[in-house]
Amino acid sequence: MIQFEGDRDFAPPPAALWGKLSDARFLVKCLPDVESVARAESSEAVCTVRPGFSFVRGTLELTIRVAEAVPERSVKLLLQSKGMGNSAVVEALLALAPHEAGTRVHWQAQVKEMGGLLKLAPQGLVLGAAQKVLADAWVAVEAQLKT
């Protein structure tokens, strides 16, 4: 099982940031490589992504679901992807806390399942790719917060 975690600081206070991070419509705008959005509601979004990784060809259908949300404190997300010969289930927990004038988000993401070619890919390759996607997504969150 692959697990990631880290901290990220944001300018908005917890109430304002939680409103964004608990909204699948906002989150889908922050994902890299999105080609189209089939459905975007506050609790769930479905999109098509074309990852730029050599070990994942074609497109993936990605579903982001807000599984749990505690106002101003935490958000639990379930991300399910499936494509030709690939599938994955990721669980992410975002914990928000006041920090200076803004918010610190402690995040944890855990790959619960991998199928198809992803399961066969070297773990280091998957780990590196996932870290890049996470870094790009956090940069996009910051950019979307400014708009």
Image (spheres, rainbow, N blue to C red):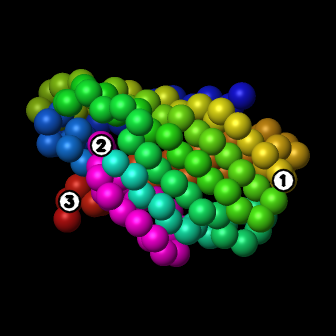
Quarter of the image for the C terminus: give it.
bottom left
Which callout, 1 or 3, points at the residue further toward the start of the chain?
1
Query: In the rendering, which numbered label is found on residue 117?
Result: 1
Q: What residue lies at 20% left-to-right and 30% top-to-bottom?
A: 71
Q: Is residue 104 left or right of residue 2?
A: left
Q: Is residue 98 left or right of residue 130?
A: left
Which callout, 2 or 3, points at the residue further toward the start of the chain?
2
- Look at the picture and state if 83 lies above or below 5: below
Q: What residue lies at 47% left-to-right and 50% top-to-bottom?
A: 64
- Look at the picture and state if 92 lies above or below 54: above
Q: Position of residue 54 (x, y in %)?
A: 78, 64
Tell me the residue that label 3 is attached to. Answer: 146
Q: Amino acid at mark 1?
A: Leu
Quarter of the image for the N terminus: give it.
top right
Camera sees residue 23: yes
Camera sees residue 128: no
Q: Secondary structure at mark 2?
A: loop
In three-dimensional space, the C-alpha distance between marks 1 and 3, rounded to whole angstroms, equals 37 Å
What span is colored magenta in the figure? 21-42
Q: What residue lies at 25% left-to-right and 48% top-to-bottom?
A: 20
Circles 1 and 2, Cβ within 8 Å, touching? The answer is no
Query: In the rendering, which numbered label is found on residue 22?
Result: 2
In three-dimensional space, the C-alpha distance between marks 1 and 2, rounded to whole angstroms, equals 31 Å
Q: Residues within 10 Å of mark 1 (few under 14, many from 20)?
A: some
Between 36 and 139, the one nearer to me in the picture: 36
Q: Amino acid at mark 2?
A: Ser
Between 33 and 48, the one nearer to me in the picture: 48
